[in-house]
Amino acid sequence: ERAAEEAAGREYIRKLDELSAKSRNRASLASWAYQSNITDYNEQRLTQISLEIAEEEKEYWKETMTYLWREFEDPDLRRMFEKYSVLGTSALPEDLNQRLIQAINNMQSTYARATICDYKDRSKCDLHVEPEVTDIFAQSNDAEELKYTWLEWHKAAGAASKDYFTEYVNMDNEAAKLNGFDSVAEWWISTYDEPDSEEQFAALWEQVKPLYQQIHAYVRRHLRLRYGEDVVSAKGPIPAHLLGNIWAQTWNNVEKFTRPYPEKPDVDVTEALIRQNYTALKMFKTAEEFFTSLNLSAMPDLFWERSIIEKPNDGRDMVCHASAWDFFDGEDFRIKQCTTITNAFFKTTHHEMGHIQYYLQYKDLPSIYRAGANPGFHEAVGDVIALSVSTPKHLRVMGLLEDGPEDLESNINQLYKMSLDKVVFLPFAYLLDLFRYGVFRGTTTTNDYNCHFWQLRESLQGVEPPAPRSEEDFDPTAKYHVSADVEYMRYYISYIIQFQFHRSLCQIAGEYVPGDPNKLLSNCDIYRSTEAGEALGKMLQLGSSKPWPDAMEALTGQRKMDASGVLEYFEPLYEWLKQENERTGEFVGWEPSNVQYC
Ligand SMILES: C=C(C[SeH])C(=O)N1CCC[C@H]1C(=O)O
Ligand SMILES: [Zn+2]
């Protein structure tokens, strides 16, 4: 009897999975049309299609739940049913789902359309976050210009979305409850499978915090030397507008005037890319060639036909934030990004192509399994490749860096440069979702949103706003992912596990030998290692068909996320920074901010 029920269940799930792939294809196409050209028509069409699909999913969900799938023998069939049993936002009554979709579209289009006026020319008021505001933060060293630009952007894209955000939180929490979660926070955390995930996230932060604090102290000293004592204090948090990035999430743009050994040759890849006439297309082809050098998949023809790799100049409104898309038909995979010729975008291109590679590796799985082993895995693939690309050794192979010394000082400079991207990012990523967990759980309410956000920014990241903040402000939606309902813990996890993946791939490629100073993890380049490519491919082909520890074990032999990879990679820098901060007497850590924000 039960065998017959299970056989029926298997046939049902196969059919459901095909229908589900068609619905996801339809949804992706409507979402792409809207995000690549924000018009009322495209927004209404997306809403209409989303609501239609939600009604279809509700019907299928009722049928799915008539099967006694928890008692099925086949673990794989149970896993598929379990994943289909989480209906998601489609569980909402249609009117509430419509309000949720509307709230997110309002935030998304506010962010995409937000413009500010130029500091020097107040009549020029068409500056977007990409590329104009990004470029100002990359190039300006005028503290007043940076302060003005920071405040204007946070008004245009932050405060403007405060009420939309509250509506989104209320509707999304309703959906979470209808799926059996206490709030969206528990729903998001459940995607990391393990019941103690939240404690694991906190433990990872404790592991890397000492390294972060040493970097923070060193950078604060060099910013104080540049901007003066009354702009950058000796012991306080660092003002957020001086760190080279509108969100202060990575600090690469201050590297050139803060690096440990300034007399050593510079590693400015942006100038080299421009000098060698790199175009957006050449960046993409170069990134693709790295993947094919590992014997991984090339980009399909459709990818080159349908991707948008530069901001169209027809004046349309669009979501410029880089993204990679799976259209769930096994053939159509695209990237949409407003590429400019910078080192940052050279990295982003590898990052996005890593998503596409994952899509290609698992495209023949049931559609329900076409996802990362956990969300952090998907964000780590491209970055793992970029860890090899950003070594001086590889950049020389590419002709993007002239020959230079491989001595200790150059290695410290290289590690410092990498730390401003990889270590500095960790507290930012962690706090962005700690903030949203608090909002979803109700411990942060609408009248202390901004206060709680800046308390986290100060306590974890040691940064402070450039001017007093009030609850008239709402700074979190000035960050894309908060305006776009994109969970962010995935990046925090990615920046930890990508070093575990890198370490294993480098050992397979013979590029890293523990304890061998000629085979440093930070100088490993897996380029052209088909063995490493095969090992990576095997993990990616699993998609989300197995619990993520199985996928991690397939590549690294480990079943736990841990920061040992990060700490091993940056160990020489950590030692150097401790000595340097000791030598200069720099205070490590920070005292409370004097800026009023609660
Ligand atoms: C490039 C993407 C698209 Se998935 C991105 O959003 N990233 C990649 C690094 C962290 C995060 C960010 O920009 O905030
Ligand atoms: Zn990504």
Image (cartoon, grey):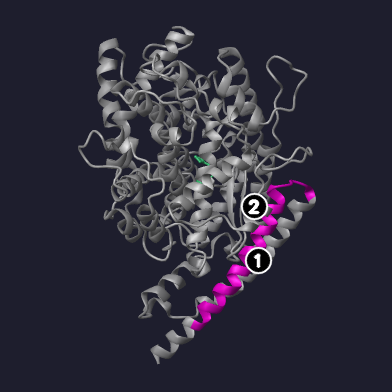
> Which residue is labeled 1 in the image?
53
- Amino acid type at circle 1 is Ile
Where is 248 relative to 368, above or below?
above
Q: Nearer the viewer, residue 552 or 341?
A: 341
Answer whether residue 28 is magenta in the image.
yes
Residue 409 visible from this viewpoint: yes
> Which residue is labeled 2 in the image?
304
Residues shaded magenta: 11-40
Residue at 37% over, 23% down: 216
Residue 583 percent across, percent down from the top left: 26, 12
- Amino acid type at circle 2 is Trp
Residue at 44% over, 24% down: 463
496 left or right, relative to 9: left
Neighbourhood count class around disc 1 (C-alpha, 10 Å): few under 14, some 14–19, many 20 upward: some
Q: Quadrant of the N terminus?
A: bottom left
Q: Nearer the viewer, residue 51 or 421?
A: 421
Magenta residues, dominant SS class: helix
Where is 132 relative to 310, above or below?
above
Q: Secondary structure at mark 2?
A: helix
Q: Secondary structure at mark 1?
A: helix
Disc with the residue nearer the chain's start (2 vs 1): 1
Answer whether residue 47 is magenta in the image.
no
Q: Nearer the viewer, residue 174 or 123?
A: 123
- Disc nearest the viewer among 2 and 1: 2
Neighbourhood count class around disc 2 (C-alpha, 10 Å): few under 14, some 14–19, many 20 upward: some
